Amino acid sequence: MKLLLATNNAGKQKEICALLEALEIELILPREIGLDLDVTEDGETYRENAALKARAFAEASGLWALADDSGLEVDALDGAPGLYSARYAPVPHPTDADRRGHLLRELTAHSRPWVARFRCVAAFTHREGKIYHAQGVCPGEIIPQERGEGGFGYDPIFLLPHKKRTMAELTMAEKNQLSHRARAIQALRPTLLEIIRPKVV
């Protein structure tokens, strides 16, 4: 069976492919089928945004589609940037570095530790079918200096205290055991397998 990864984010594609590579499912990237969608994420929750993306990609392709929506929640900022993590910088077309820089500037007035968590909701569906969801959370804290070359987004400033490393300092295998996205995908995996894998009679 084929499963379309409903994202154009190369970092997310890499992580999800690694998470699902052992399954008997053919993973398809949008560019491989000439699909170029930019879905407006105007939902009020991660769940709504994940569903919007999964539905749009499924309808455009005719395939089962898997999407996720995620964000960084910082306690000192009352949960911001949260749902707006990808747009959290007062500049047009912000880069990951722009977002990290803006976050750290917002935090300078607050005492450390800057307790935070990554939250992710994954969703998959097929056209007009039911949308299946699962959530994953990864607790940690924000640090003022970037560390590590891996990952993307806020990973270089997101510290996992029990590991004493940032998310960007983990290997892909380590990240895919601990991350919010890994936990959401793993929670969704049994349902995904039950629904889209051919059943053995």
Image (tube, rainbow, N blue to C red):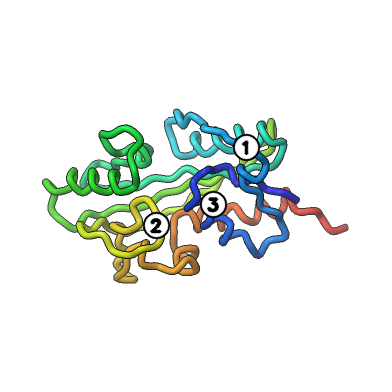
User: Residue, x 49% and y 46% (percent of image)?
Assistant: 9
Distance in Å between CA atoms under marks 3 and 2: 19 Å
**Is 115 or 108 nearer to us in this picture?**
108
Distance in Å between CA atoms under marks 1 and 3: 14 Å
Instruction: Name the kind of residue labelled 1 in the image.
Output: Leu
The percent coordinates of residue 6 (x first, y second) are 58, 42
* Pointer 1 residue: 35
The percent coordinates of residue 114 (x first, y second) are 22, 54
162 relative to 128, above or below: below
Distance in Å between CA atoms under marks 2 and 1: 31 Å
Q: Quadrant of residue 25?
A: bottom right
Q: Residue 61 got which mark?
A: none
* Pointer 3 residue: 13
Q: Disc 2 or disc 1, which is closer to the eye?
A: 1
**Is 124 or 26 nearer to us in this picture?**
26
The percent coordinates of residue 41 (x first, y second) are 46, 32
Badge 3 element: helix
